[in-house]
Image: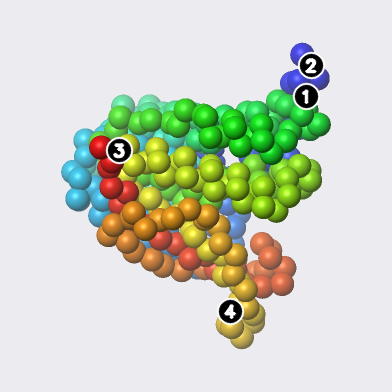
Amino acid sequence: MVLQRLRKTRRACQLGLTSGQIGIYNRYIREHEGWEKHLSESRQAIIGAVEVFKPQSICILGSGLLLDVPLEELLSRNINIVLVDLLHPAQIVNKYSSNSLVRFETHDLTGGLIHYLQTTRLKDLNFFTLLNLVSSANAYASNADLVVSLNLLSQLSDIPMEFLRHKKVLTDWQGIELASTIQQKHLESLSKSKSLLITDIMEEFYDDQGKLTATRPTVHVDLSLLTQVQEWLWEFDSAKTYNEDAITKLRVVSGLVNKKG
Ligand SMILES: C[S@@+](CC[C@H](N)C(=O)[O-])C[C@H]1O[C@@H](n2cnc3c(N)ncnc32)[C@H](O)[C@@H]1O
């Protein structure tokens, strides 16, 4: 029992569950200028979808610090807001928990992979068990009039994948296969509602002269089902703290996911 609790705490740390959000905030402070365009494009895309669907309720997946959420605007339209994240930052909960239009829900949107990685012994982790867990998991279902997946899709797979790679549990192809399955399940869950997807799809690495030197895809699923697509570049890291060899920009897309059935 004590061992299990210790493992859970240690794994939360190794998975970077809290430090990830702190990292986002610190980078936002440092890179404020470069981030503002991305944050503003994300907020605009949400307002655009609100104008299309005129929802009375909205569910934001990956709400985190709300940097990219036009929360005051949504509140001024009297929209009920459900904020979903693995972990809600204390300052956000303190600020909005007494607002009757705002509700917080805590879910692992991988369908339980994070909990599994936190509680399972390393020697019991293997590709086929993980793939089976992700493929058969029940996806989170929202009954809100509009669902927004907000700068989350690549994170959903990156957080477990970084840990599994570091612990050498998966080979490269197994990592990509598992990441694709996590992302595909998320996309399928979005297609059950009227949804807006905002996600980075590619890391782009630049040298000091502004020349593109390399790229790495962050999304491994087909996004051709999106409509009303917009695309922009997120000036993510100019200080080379993310990749010490290059300035990193992220290619981001937003688009409506058409409801199936
Ligand atoms: C890049 S942030 C999105 C930006 C966020 N809206 C903000 O302003 O901070 C990704 C968010 O997804 C959340 N997240 C990552 N993996 C998750 C998972 N498996 N289930 C639910 N939320 C997750 C993180 O906690 C984080 O708050």
Residue type pointed to by label 1: Leu
Identify the residue at the far bottom of this view: 209
- Dot in front, 4 or 2: 4
Report the residue marked by disc 1: 6
Residue type pointed to by label 3: Ser
- x and y percentages locating residue 180 in the rendered image: 54, 48
Scheme of colours in the image? rainbow
Residue 2's label in the rendered image is 2
From the viewer's side, name the closer residue of 15 and 36: 15
Report the residue marked by disc 3: 193
Q: Disc 1 and disc 3: Cα gap in Å?
A: 39 Å
- Dot in front, 3 or 4: 3
Give the secondary structure at mark 2: helix
Report the residue marked by disc 4: 212
- x and y percentages locating residue 146 in the rendered image: 28, 40
Q: Disc 1 and disc 4: Cα gap in Å?
A: 44 Å
Asked where in the image residue 227 lies, by quadrant, the reply is bottom left
Q: Earlier in the sequence, mark 3 or mark 4?
A: 3
